[in-house]
Every structure is written in C-alpha cells, then in structure tokens.
Amino acid sequence: MAKAHWGRWGLAAVVIMALLALGTSARAACALPGKSEIHFGGTVSLTGVFSDDGKWYKQVYDLWTEQVNARGGILGCPVKMTIYDDKSDAKTVVGLFEKLITVDKVDILVSPWTSALVYAASPVAEKFEKVLVEGGGCSEVIYSRGNKWIFNTMTATGNGHALGVFNWIKTLPPDKRPKTVANIYAESVWSIASADAVRFFARDADMRILVDEAYSLKTTDFTPLVQKLKAANADVVLLHSYFADTVQIVKTMKELKVNPKLLWSGAGSSHTNFTEVVGDLAEGIVTGSHVEPWMPFKGNKEFSEAFRKKYGKEVYDYPAVGYAALQALEQGITATKSLDQKVLQKYFRTASFDLIMGPTRFTSTGAPSVQTLVEVQWQKGQDGKWKRVIYYPETDAYGLGIKVKTGDIQYPKRVFN
C-alpha cells in the first residue's frame, strides 16, 4: 500500500517537473531562427570630458536591458548588452565599433553620447551596413553626408536647440524684447552647429551679437571669457555647453557679477542634479528639453519611476532619449521579427514609433521628422523645491493638443547674489 502511495506521488512529481521544464523551455525559446539571444553593443563615455552624461546613458542602457529580460526578452530572446568606455575620444569610438561588429559579432548597435562621437560611429555603421538608432547626437552634420543606416530619436537637431528661445523672444512686445546676444560655444560638433544657427536666429529676431566666441573643452579657467561677457553686457547670454563647463561658467559669472536678462544653457543645465551643484545660481537659467517625466507619452511615466527606483535620482532628458532609441529598436525587431539589417533599415524609414517623448518618425536622412524641443526654466518654489517650468510653447508640436506649458518665465532673471 505504501509502495502504491509513493508511486502515485512519484508520478505526480515527475509530471509537475516535466510541466515546469516545458514552461521554462517555452519562456526561453527565442523566436528568431538560429539565435539564443540578441546581442546589443555600443560605447559610452565613462571617462573623459563627456563622462558626466555618458555615465547616465550607461545606467539607462542597463535599466532597459533589465526590463526587457524581466518581461521575457524580445520575441522570447534574452538581450545581452555589451558597452565599452570610449573615453570621450572619437578614434576610440571607431576602433570599438569595428570590434563590436567584427569580433563581438553584435546583432544591434547602440549609440554613444554626443554628436562628436556619433559622428565618429556613423561611418562605421555605414561601412558594415548596420542600423544605428541613436539618441546621443543631433547635429545636422551627422545627417547631411548621405548616411543611410542612422536614425535619431532626439526631438530636435543640433541646429535647432536654441530656436525655442528666439521664438519665445518674438512673442514679446517689441519694446520688451532683448536687443543683444552673447554666443558662447565649446569646440565640439554639437556646440559649433548650435552656435552657428544662433547667428541666423539673431538676425531674424533683429538682435545684435556682441560676443561670438569658442572655448576649448580643456578650459579650466573661464575668467577671461566671462570678463568679455561682462564688458559686452549683452541682454541674452547663450551657452552651447556641457555640464562641467556650464557649472564653471555660471560660477565665474556670479563671481564677476555678470547678470544678463536671460541666460540659456544647452546640454549643460539639463541635468537634474544641476541645482545640487550650483545651488541658487540655477534660479532663472533656461534650457531646452527633449522630454519631461510628467509628459503623457507611452511608457514615459513608468520609465521615470523605474529609473528613480533603481538609481535613487531623477532622470533628465538626454539619457531619456537614449532609452527611447532602445524602445525604437525593440519595436522594430518585434514588428519585423528580424535582425536582418536591411529589413530593419527599411522598417525604420517608413514606420512610426511610440516612444517616451511622443510619436516619432524619421526623415529620409534619419533625422527626427518633427522638432518638438520645449524650453524650460529652473525655478525654486516657495517650498524650497526646484521645478523645471516649461514656458514655451503652449502645446505639443505633434498636434495632439497636449498642453505642455506649466508656468511663466521669470524675465529678466534674478541677478546672481
């Protein structure tokens, strides 16, 4: 009797184990022929002058990989992510991208951060005919040399980063508009393109440029440059700058008592920890933003919350666009059920993607089809908490009727104390 009892339980145990094994096998089965996983690979700047942003991109890439694998991968295929440190160096990017393709045999390329490094990576993608969906570089020069394999998820090209500021200026009564500009830019691909566009925007807004000067990314003492700003006393100062240089320039402006009516910084003041580093000096500084955490686009809120939970800090717009590039890749692979690069290339040329910054399509050059950058200003509330107030435009550029304006700009900005 005992033997029969054990036999029944033993048979049940075998059946359960078989069912569990079958379930595990089903979950692990990759629907792509000949593949057991999908290998993504790219570079980011973990060291060097671009590492302030590069480290955030690495965190976003890691988060996305965890999320995808937690929900069973793409088409049942686990995702493997290989990211190398490109040391903020264009030549290193080229060498590592060739290694990723020829040695690591990655299926899908992942973008570095900043236009200079995307500019270096894109010819490698072209050479090997590999799709590169990127959220790291937006300069027009990347998309003006006939590339066929690169697609950009950013919501504005580099030339258009300061456009919103000038569009807002033109909404002011003529007697209230600023009349003069200082145009300061780093010697980098994005900064040069952004500053070049300002020369046109300023003429269009009937504004005079009083200072138009570049600085090396190796600069550590900005006193001579800021002294020129002080002497010029322009109404508007535009900094086409990154995080570390923005911090130093702003601190030097405070020391030398340079107080423009409007201070705009490109990528530099976008960081959500900018206020932690410069404190009350952030008050009134304006910048452009590709996406804000509250915007009601697919997956945006969930992404922001997941980033906060994993890393204990708020994400900002640039790494968010890097996440969106991975979203687009996932959607493209899922829709085509293919890793064939020509199949994916064709799909990216024609499809629309639901991304965390909104519905996205690409032009024939791979650039974003709609320029949707919003202009934000750092403002400290009466409760002592910092807010990024969207002051322009009123509604989204997608034509969805979403009100994006969250408050009015402080203009002129508060003086540095």
Image (cartoon, rainbow, N blue to C red):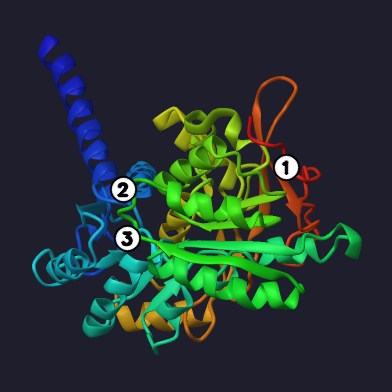
Q: Nearer the viewer, mark 1 or mark 3?
A: 1
Position above or below: 117 against 369: above
Q: Nearer the viewer, mark 3 or mark 2?
A: 2
In the image, residue 263 lies at what x, y percent? 64, 50
**Crowding near pointer 2: few (<14 within 10 Å), some, many (20+)?**
many
Cα separation between marks 3 and 2: 11 Å
In the image, residue 218 lies at what x, y percent? 30, 54
For image coordinates 26% across by 55% down, the residue present is 29
Please give the residue where the numbered disc 2 appears in the rendered image.
51
For image coordinates 20% across by 52% down, the residue present is 85
Is 82 displayed left or right of 315 in the figure? left
The answer to whether marks 2 and 1 mark residues whose Cβ atoms lie closer than 8 Å is no
Q: What's the residue type where badge 1 is placed?
A: Lys
Please give the residue where the numbered disc 1 appears in the rendered image.
413
Position above or below: 281 against 177: above
**Crowding near pointer 1: few (<14 within 10 Å), some, many (20+)?**
some
Mark before the other along the chain sequence, 1 or 3? 3
Residue 173 seen anywhere in this rendered image of the structure: no
Q: What's the residue type where badge 3 is placed?
A: Pro
Q: Label for residue 156? A: none
Q: Nearer the viewer, mark 2 or mark 1?
A: 1
Q: Label for residue 112? A: 3
**Crowding near pointer 3: few (<14 within 10 Å), some, many (20+)?**
many
Is 202 displayed left or right of 302 in the figure? right
Quadrant in the rendering for residue 116:
bottom left
- Secondary structure beneath dot 1 equals loop
Cα separation between marks 1 and 3: 35 Å
Location of the C terminus (image quadrant): top right
